[in-house]
Structures are given as C-alpha cells and as structure tokens.
Image (tube, helix red, strand yellow):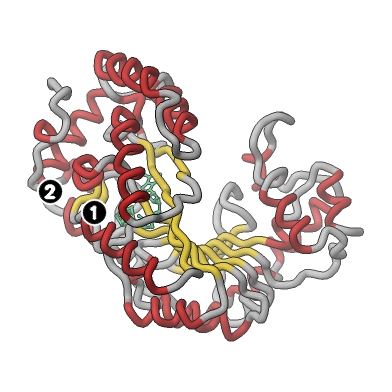
Amino acid sequence: MKLIQIVNNNGCSLPWLHAEVNVSPKHILPCCKYENGIKYDRIIDAWNGNEMTSVRNDFVNGKLPAKCWKCDVAEHEFSYMKWKGQSLMYEVNQYQDVDVVKAPVSINMILSGVCNLACRMCKPTSSSKFVEVIKPSAFLKNLYNDKVYAPNIDVESLRGFFVNAKSITFSGGEPLVDDSIFDIIQLANTESANLRTISFSTNMTAFRKDVIDYLKSLNVIVNFNVSIDGPKLIHEYIRVGCNWNTIVDNIRYLKSLSSKFHFGINTTQSALNVGYIPEFLQDIEKISTELDLKIERIKPSSILETHMHPASLPQHIKDVYIKKLSQAKGKSTLTNADWLIDTSIELMKKPAGNTELFIKFLNEFDLVAKTDYKTVYPEFDF
Ligand SMILES: C[S@@+](CC[C@H](N)C(=O)[O-])C[C@H]1O[C@@H](n2cnc3c(N)ncnc32)[C@H](O)[C@@H]1O
Ligand code: SF4
C-alpha cells in the first residue's frame, strides 16, 4: 500500500513524514493536533515505537486513531491531514510504501524554555524570564497549570532522528539564544544530506553569534519568522523587555550577511493588539521600506486563553475597535492585511470572553512589570 492510498481514503500521511517534538521535557507527536505527547528516551525509538506504529496501522486499516480526534472535522473544515499531510506527501513521495518507515522529512521542534523576554501572553513553560517576572504575583502564578520552564536539552537523545530531514523549524523559548541550538543544528546537518530549510520562530532581540555564523556557512535557506505583535509602542508593552529598534537593527544585520536568510512575520492576536492592526500594518510597511525587506507573509495566530482573548475586551471598546478596523479594510498593500483585520473582528465577536479576568490580569501584570496600561491604551477607561 502507498501513502497516496491512505490520503485518498481520507487518512493522514503525517505519521510517516512529519514530527512535532518537545525536547524538554521529551515527547514526540505525529502532528500538533495529536492528543498528548509520546514520551521518549531516544527519539528514534519512539518514532519507530508501539504508539506511532499503532497510529500508522490504524490509517492503513482505514481507521482514525483515537488520539487524532481533533482532525475528525467536517469535509470543508481545516485539518492537518488534508493540508500539511498532502502537501508534504506530494513534495516527498506519494508512492512511498507504507511499510517503509523512514525518519521524518519535516520536523517542528520546541526547544527549552530559556528566553530573554516576558511577553504578557506567554506562559511559565515557555519563558524563564516570564517565570522571573511574575514571581511576586500570587494571582499570576495561580493562573497557569504549567508552573516551570524546562531548562535542559539532551542532544544525544536526538541522534539518528535527522537522517531524512529536509525542513526543520525551531521554536522555544527563544531558539536563537538556546544553549543547545548550535549542537542540534550541527547534528541535523551532519546526519541529513537533504537538509533544505531551517526556520526559526524568534523574538529577534538577541542571537548567538556562533549559531548565525554556522547557519551562514550551510547550504540551506534560513527563515527567520519574527514575532511582531503590534505597532512599536504596543509591541514593546506586550513583550516585556523588548526594544523595537533592536529588532530592526538585528534584521538589518542578518539581512546583510546572506541572501539565504529570509524574513517573515508572525503575529499573535490578543486583546492587547486587535484594535491596532492598521497601525501595526503601517509600522511593518515602514520596516519593509527602511530595510528594503520583502515581507513574504504575515502569519496570524490567536491566543486561546481567556485572560487575554480579544473577546474579553469590554463591549464598548470592542465596538470602537470593530468600527475602526472595518474602516481600515482595503488600505494596506501588505499580503494578508485584510484577512488579519477580518480575523481580529471575528475574534472580538466570539462569545468566550471574561472582561473581569482580563482587567485583573492587566493590572497584576502592570504591577510586576512596572508598567501602566493607561499610557499605552488611552481608550481603556477602567
Ligand atoms: C512561544 S514563542 C517561542 C518563539 C519565540 N520566542 C517567539 O516569541 O517568537 C512562539 C510563538 O507563540 C506565540 N505565543 C506566545 N504565547 C502564546 C499564547 N498564549 N497563545 C498563542 N500563541 C502564543 C508567540 O507570539 C510566538 O509567535
Ligand atoms: S519571546 Fe517568545 S518564548 Fe519568550 S516570552 Fe515572548 S513569546 Fe514567550
């Protein structure tokens, strides 16, 4: 049986081609929607182990594996097995036999929680700085189920996993300052003869020079997907410890180093930035012009947690924002601009809000970060 038959039968090829990896604590998943990570000591053993084999067998037998239930969606709705699975399969080998289980072609890796910023929407497992900043607030510490970030990476446990890798994406923590990132990239490059792209989700405020020098020496495309969450003032308020000008300087510097270094933008939509999409787009256009930078795409995602969800804004603020955003449609030349506006409006209209919790969170974070939301959001009259 070939992978294409699995897909044509409404199954998923990702368990043969892709892996989501959390290296600290160690677990692996066939995709980001799979329920619960599979623990590993040596990652390649888990990739070839009982649970992954059982997932593959279920698809071979025309069944949806129990832990893939999030992809059990209506025909028209988004699911990874229809999207990423199919595109990867066509890119790789739609006629690969299902009995041939090679190491993954595409890998998304979340590194340790070491980070130099404390962004308000982040969480203790993802940022060492966040843990430090929220320490004085009992309210903030109680808000999160995951209490600590994971500092250590066992690079040796990854050996043998990259032999088939074409594309690897690193997130964190802040991957460009992670203690193990150099060793992991070196291992991947040594093991894989086919490595084509390395991507980073990065705050772009700091990087290890040895990592950049090494990336420059490789024959791969490097995508820096820079997280920018609003215009300058809003971005610096949300991302505690961040300096906008440092980001611009760092992009300028990296761009000057290699034509193989490419740049994109990720933006995380929350109550603290949905009202400022037009100003955000203007500041991105400014960066693009100033640095002569081609912004390949702006990729939005939304925070799901209630305490910063756009729906948690007070109704009268949402009314003002929605009117402002509706008037801004069609005015930016950036790809995705109107889509960004539409999704922001949609998020504010969701029923999932908790205004009281949002205001309490805002005040508590201001106390620990020594900031004042009223200087950034004059419309917040509470
Ligand atoms: C956890 S960060 C790690 C990589 C890097 N430090 C950065 O900020 O890009 C990866 C992405 O998750 C986003 N993010 C942070 N907290 C989030 C949350 N609560 N919900 C959804 N996305 C979130 C960030 O904005 C960023 O785009
Ligand atoms: S830079 Fe990334 S990992 Fe660090 S606190 Fe911000 S969102 Fe979290």
Q: Is residue 375 left or right of residue 67?
A: left
Name the residue furthest bottom: 190
Q: Residue furthest right?
A: 1
Image quarter in which the C terminus is found: top left
Q: Position of residue 41 (x, y in %)?
A: 55, 75
Residue at figure coordinates x 50%, y 69% from the top left? 260
Q: Residue 85 location, x and y as percent?
A: 71, 51
x and y, in percent, of residue 148 in the image: 30, 59
Q: Nearer the viewer, residue 296 or 112?
A: 296
Q: Residue at x 69, y 36 (%)?
A: 72
Q: Is residue 347 left or right of residue 131?
A: right
Q: Residue at x 27, y 16 (%)?
A: 320
Mark 2 or mark 1: whose residue is earlier in sequence: 1
Q: Does the CB distance between marks 2 and 1 fall below 8 Å?
A: yes
Which residue is label 1 attached to? 118
Ligand 2 is located in which of the four quadrants? bottom left
How far across and how far down the image is residue 61, in percent? Answer: 86, 50
- Pointer 1: residues within 10 angstroms few (<14), some, or many (20+)? many
Element class at badge 2: helix
Q: How many marks?
A: 2
Residue annotated with mark 2 = 369
Q: Nearer the viewer, residue 66 or 363?
A: 363
The quadrant holding residue 103 is: bottom right
Disc 1 CB within 8 Å of nearest ligand 2 atom: yes
**Badge 2 amino acid:** Ala
Please identify the quadrant where the N terminus is shown. bottom right
Q: Is residue 315 left or right of residue 364?
A: right
Q: Is residue 201 visible?
A: yes
Residue appearing at x 76%, y 57% in the figure: 89
Q: Label 2: few (<14), some or many (≥20) within 10 Å?
A: some
In front of the other: 33 or 244: 244
- Helix, strand or loop status at disc 1: strand
